[in-house]
Image (cartoon, rainbow, N blue to C red):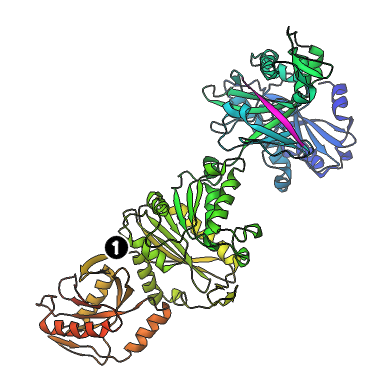
């Protein structure tokens, strides 16, 4: 390019001392210094009112067989703005520099502008340096020459960039049905916004009426990002580059919109949207085909029809041209075109991808959509859960607004109803609510459920229990026909989240996970506070039962995110899980306390199911070995469920110090025992309680009860019967499996 040409583009020549921008001064200084290592040469400097330009020649490392027409020496201009703080622009000055991907939009007949980085200038300028800037330019040119500028798997740049408006489509709308949608738009917004729905939108002031024409183009090769078409004539030229005659096809479609006879001009008053489907093949990888969908607003139907020669108007009436005329070139050039980019609303696949997830969520039945349940479900819905049945009979009251995802407009409605509508419409407000994947049942879960509720918990891939209800968890555990369960609840002190997950075979169920959690609370000092009621209560109504726990919304939000994360990470695993997450009030960080999961063994005696695990057996066996050659024993702690006649035994105490023992007999003492039982009950809010006795048999004897053992069990049965409780006795001997007796 001549000196005169450079001056016309970039301003009068100057010396680098005349530069005011810190970037242009630093870059020219670097080019004149020793660190450039001969890879570039400063040719000239230019200045204008708002721009400082450095012209240089760059050495390019070329492959043996270049893919693109990149030369070993390329002249580029680096432009630095002096008024606005913007990224320096790099222009390739060779007149025949090739059209390539990753070039910025430029006016016609302007030098090619290289797109060096997808990162905004505000976020990257602190990393800018003259040496890195030069290396970015050389790297761009080298990768362009080798055909690696656009990597395999990298999303292609759109053929048309910087749209002037957006069309929001239903999440599952296909291109084939876009012309069947109802479209409304807001002309006053910038950029222009339009919405496509399957149902006719309400008429609103300021909203325009549109009809969509859909056309399918043949595949074209991906190349430089095109400039936006300003007129219908520009758009026709763009289509001609793919061998497609736009005006002829468009005329056929507009003619189909024409009324059969003459109608009033007002009845033919609507805007035309042209939807084009553009299949794109790659230059570097022609076997890879992608597609783009673009929409163009091409003005009023009447003006378009008259320009295409298929519509005529006269005396306020509009009708089809009896003899279609050739398109008017002048009128086509006068029709302004706005480029509209279509966006589909969030669906399951896009939600998963946006969150970096690859495994689909199962369908879920959610029991309890209060503060924790609603927040957790909202997170999961944003991450890709698309099918959920919400089960809750409670109504939404004003005090619930303090920590629920619903707001004041939901007060008085059933929580499950309002939340299911919110989640379904959040993804796709234009969809039919009856087609939403979020259903609701306003019924309390318990024995004898309705057929609808029964079906929901049977057919779901998972049942999520956020009810914080012992009764609900035990009912789920007792039923063989419900799906695998996941439970999360916050402790009374509002500083610990407990999460229980059944295994895929449901050999480990919620009631057993409850029991081993209570054992961990007793045995692990980190959890000793968990069931103490540190928080206060608040009354939200008149009756004494209208009370709610004071629970900070910030805590609930953190716990909801943790519960959603644990479900997301572990729902594909067939293993059971049990953990506690403690919240530090100073740092608001979570500390995980794992709870070892064991598989229980169940024996059924006298109508009662008694569960225990290897950890309990090992503890009794260890105490037996310490007591040898004499017998030893103590008391048993467990979780009783009278309604379902089950007892989960998880702890055995050591022998009280005032006990008496012989090689063939044992009499348990009572010293300190009441304090121990009370302490266990206090730590677990009475959930873990005294359920019976255990003792050992010495070597050479079976673990079956003797006559004396049977008499002792009968005495215990009579005592426990006063409280309508069973009498449970374990005998541990040389056999590792204890003998279990139930007096009832």
Residue range of the region highlighted in magenta in the rendering: 207-216
User: Is disc 1 placed on a helix, strand or loop?
Assistant: loop
Task: Name the one closer to the observer, 100 or 188.
Answer: 188
Q: Position of residue 641 (x, y in %)?
A: 33, 71
Quadrant position of residue 33: top right
Give the vertical position of 599 relative to 251 (above or below). below
Q: Position of residue 365 (x, y in %)?
A: 44, 53
Q: Residues within 10 Å of mark 1 (few under 14, many from 20)?
A: some
Q: Residue at x 72, y 44 (%)?
A: 128
Q: Residue beneath label 1, please? A: 599
Task: Name the one closer to the observer, 55 or 48.
Answer: 48
Residue 608 located left or right of residue 286: left
What is the chief secondary structure element of the magenta stretch? Answer: strand
Q: Quadrant of the N terminus?
A: top right
Figure label count: 1
Give the vertical position of 144 relative to 386 (above or below). above
Q: Quadrant of the C terminus?
A: bottom left
Q: Residue at x 57, y 66 (%)?
A: 555
Of all residues, the one furthest to the left in this rendering is 700
Q: Is residue 104 visible?
A: no
Residue 536 located left or right of residue 688: right
Q: Is residue 351 magenta?
A: no
């Amino acid at each position: 390019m001549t000196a005169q040409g450079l001056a016309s583009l970039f301003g009068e020549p100057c010396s680098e001392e005349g530069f005011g921008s810190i970037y242009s001064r630093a870059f020219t200084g670097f080019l004149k210094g020793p660190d450039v290592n001969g890879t570039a040469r400063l040719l000239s400097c230019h200045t204008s009112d708002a721009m400082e330009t450095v012209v240089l020649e760059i050495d390019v490392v070329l492959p043996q067989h270049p893919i693109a027409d990149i030369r070993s020496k390329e002249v580029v201009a680096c432009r630095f703005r002096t008024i606005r703080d913007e990224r320096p622009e790099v222009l390739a000055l060779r007149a025949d520099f090739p059209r390539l991907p990753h070039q910025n939009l430029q006016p016609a007949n302007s030098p090619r502008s290289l797109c060096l980085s997808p990162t905004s200038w505000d976020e990257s300028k602190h990393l800018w340096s003259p040496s890195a800037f030069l290396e970015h330019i050389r790297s761009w040119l080298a990768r362009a020459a080798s055909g690696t500028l656009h990597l395999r798997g990298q999303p292609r740049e759109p053929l048309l960039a910087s749209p002037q408006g957006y069309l929001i489509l239903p999440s599952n709308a296909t291109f084939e049905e876009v012309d069947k949608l109802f479209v409304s738009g807001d002309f006053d917004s910038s950029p222009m916004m339009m919405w496509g729905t399957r149902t006719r939108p309400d008429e609103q002031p300021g909203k325009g009426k549109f009809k969509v024409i859909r056309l399918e183009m043949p595949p074209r090769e991906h190349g430089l990002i095109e400039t936006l078409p300003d007129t219908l004539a520009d758009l026709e030229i763009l289509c001609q580059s793919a061998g497609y005659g736009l005006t002829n096809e468009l005329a056929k479609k507009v003619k189909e919109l024409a009324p059969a006879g003459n109608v009033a001009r007002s009845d033919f008053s609507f805007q035309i949207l042209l939807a084009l489907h553009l299949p794109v093949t790659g230059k570097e990888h022609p076997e890879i085909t992608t597609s783009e969908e673009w929409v163009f607003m091409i003005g009023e139907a009447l003006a378009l029809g008259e320009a295409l020669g298929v519509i005529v108007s006269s005396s306020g009436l509009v009708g089809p041209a009896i003899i279609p005329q050739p398109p008017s070139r002048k009128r086509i050039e006068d029709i302004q075109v706005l480029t509209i980019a279509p966006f589909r609303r969030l669906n399951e696949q896009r939600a998963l991808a946006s969150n970096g997830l690859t495994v689909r969520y199962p369908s879920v039945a959610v029991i309890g959509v209060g503060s924790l349940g609603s927040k957790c479900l909202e997170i999961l819905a944003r991450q890709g859960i698309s099918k959920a049945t919400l089960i809750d009979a409670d109504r939404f009251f004003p005090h619930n607004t303090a920590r629920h995802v619903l707001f004041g407009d939901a007060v008085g409605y059933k929580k499950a109803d309002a939340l299911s509508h919110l989640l379904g419409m959040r993804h796709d407000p234009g969809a039919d609510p009856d087609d939403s994947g979020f259903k609701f049942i306003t019924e309390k879960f318990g024995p004898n459920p309705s057929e609808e509720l029964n079906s929901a918990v049977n057919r779901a891939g998972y049942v999520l229990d956020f009810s914080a209800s012992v009764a609900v968890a035990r009912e789920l555990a007792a039923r063989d026909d419900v799906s695998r369960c996941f439970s999360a609840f916050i402790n009374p002190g509002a500083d610990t989240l407990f999460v229980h997950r059944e295994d895929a075979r449901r050999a480990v169920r919620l009631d057993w996970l409850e029991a081993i959690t209570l054992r961990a609370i007793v045995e692990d000092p980190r959890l000793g506070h968990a069931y103490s009621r540190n928080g206060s209560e608040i009354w939200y109504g008149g009756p004494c039962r209208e009370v709610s726990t004071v629970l900070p919304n910030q805590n609930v939000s953190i716990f909801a995110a943790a519960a959603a994360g644990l479900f997301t990470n572990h729902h594909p695993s067939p293993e059971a899980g049990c953990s506690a997450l403690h919240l530090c009030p100073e740092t608001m960080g979570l500390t995980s306390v794992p709870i070892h999961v064991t598989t229980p063994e169940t024996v059924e005696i006298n109508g009662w199911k008694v569960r225990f695990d290897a950890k309990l057996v090992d503890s009794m066996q260890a105490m037996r070995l310490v007591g040898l050659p004499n017998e030893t024993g103590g008391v048993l702690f467990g979780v009783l469920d009278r309604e379902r006649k089950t007892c989960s035994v998880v702890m055995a105490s050591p022998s009280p110090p005032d006990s008496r023992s012989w090689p063939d007999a044992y009499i348990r003492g009572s010293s300190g025992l009441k304090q121990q039982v009370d302490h266990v009950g206090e730590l677990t809010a009475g959930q873990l309680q005294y359920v019976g006795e255990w003792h050992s048999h010495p070597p050479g004897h079976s673990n079956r009860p003797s006559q004396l053992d049977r008499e002792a069990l009968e005495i215990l049965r009579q005592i426990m019967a006063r409280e309508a409780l069973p009498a449970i006795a374990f005998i541990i001997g040389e056999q590792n499996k204890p003998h279990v007796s139930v007096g009832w």
